[in-house]
Amino acid sequence: MATPFRYPTGARPLLLEETARRRSVESRFVALLEEAGFGEVVLPIIDFAEPYATVIGRDAARESYRFTDREGELVAIRSDFTPMVARALAPVIEPAALPLRVFYRGDVIRCEATRLGANRELFQIGAELIGDDSINADIAMLRLAVSIARAFGIEPLAVCTDASIVFRFDAGTRQALSTKRLQAGLPRLAQQLLAGTATVADVESERLETVAGQLADDPAFVWQLDDVEPGAGYYTGIRFRLFGAGRGTCIAQGGRYDALYGRFGTAAPAIGFTFTIDNLPARAGERRKEAIA
């Protein structure tokens, strides 16, 4: 039974100091994205569940809170911004208006098994570059994510892979990669991925080699190609996770998803990233103030 002193698992209020910190971080994020040429879009906190049924993976679907509204429609509370941005923009964007740079911010709520003290309600800020399928777009968005982390005094580590690697294999090989189980008869590249020894050169992708080469001057970027997920949802190319101090918590993630917009209307390549503000180091905002004082 609910009491005046309890909240649902994974939900809590932000009081004065935490709210002030979040607003400070949020304001700085917005300024950085606007300086980079991104404009804001605002998305609803709930939407019909059906449009996303074939877009998000099974695990992601299980993480969303769903309920039937008074009209008998199945709706879901926002748990992932990226498909919602595509659903909002794809029906109305004109190819002549591309490329388009947008950012968003707000809460996502996920019904996932929580660790002690973990949140189900998370505040996120993210950005998308829509309509540019170039290698330069990949490099620019990866560098932007890292530069934002550094603006908050964080020394980031971007662990990068390529979601398109798994598309080269048959279903049996993808299953082996999913379970991390080495089996006889697997293609050489799959064996290297499972052993954790695959390099960018082993993948034999000119695009991947170019991106990795252009980022080689920045020690923040490392390539961990065995970080493959056969059920990686809508990602179709470069994918990365960004870690901060201690390397234990993912503060941002993103990548390329060139097939997503076409499922909702106008087909357009896209690449983006999302920061989970709650996962930033507790003193990130304070460090920024000290740096500019």
Image: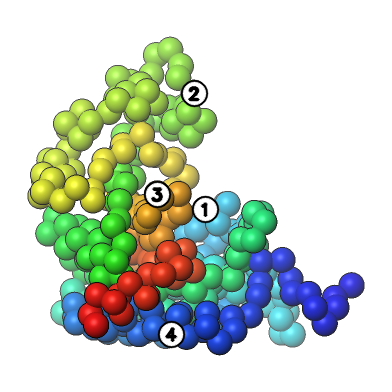
**Label 4 vs label 1: CA separation?**
32 Å
The residue beneath circle 4 is: 23
Q: Amino acid at mark 4?
A: Arg
Observer-nearest of 92 and 15? 15
Q: Amino acid at mark 2?
A: Arg
Total number of numbered discs in the rendering = 4
Q: Which mark is residue 45?
A: none
| Residue under the point 43% across and 41% down | 229
The residue beneath circle 3 is: 247
The residue beneath circle 2 is: 181
**Label 1 vs label 2: CA separation?**
22 Å
Q: Quadrant of residue 216?
A: top left
Horizontally, residue 53 falls left or right of residue 268, namely right
- Earlier sequence position, callout 4 versus callout 1: 4
The residue beneath circle 1 is: 57
| Residue under the point 38% across and 39% down | 227
- Earlier sequence position, callout 3 versus callout 1: 1
Q: Amino acid at mark 3?
A: Arg
